[in-house]
Image (tube, rainbow, N blue to C red):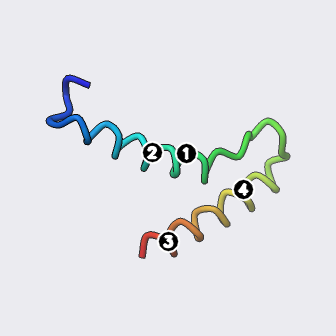
Amino acid sequence: MAKFLSSKSPQKFASIHASFHNHFNQERHLYDRRNFKLNRTAALEEWCQLAA
């Protein structure tokens, strides 16, 4: 927290990081490689649309 200039910065960072992590966290060990890559590609495409 010492690196953040204001008290609102860590909250903002955490909320953005949480939404990004939740979107891309696919629990890789539960999928075979082909399905993992398909889900990861779909998540990246959706994230790019949301960010545009």
User: Which of the image's four quarters has the C terminus?
Assistant: bottom left
Circle 4: is it few (<14), some (14-19), or many (20+) Cα within 10 Å? some
N-terminal-most mark, 3 or 2: 2
User: Which of the image's four quarters has the N terminus?
Assistant: top left
- The type of residue carrying mark 3 is Leu
Q: Is residue 20 above or below residue 7?
A: below
**Where is mark 1, residue-wise?**
21
**Where is mark 2, residue-wise?**
17
Q: Marks 2 and 1: CB-CB under 8 Å?
A: yes
N-terminal-most mark, 3 or 4: 4
Q: Marks 1 and 4: CB-CB under 8 Å?
A: no
C-alpha span from label 1 to label 4: 16 Å
- The type of residue carrying mark 2 is His
Which residue is pictured at 67% across the width and 66% down the height? Answer: 42
- The type of residue carrying mark 1 is His
Give the quadrant of residue 41.
bottom right
Q: Is residue 46 above or below residue 30?
A: below
Residue 37, label in figure: 4
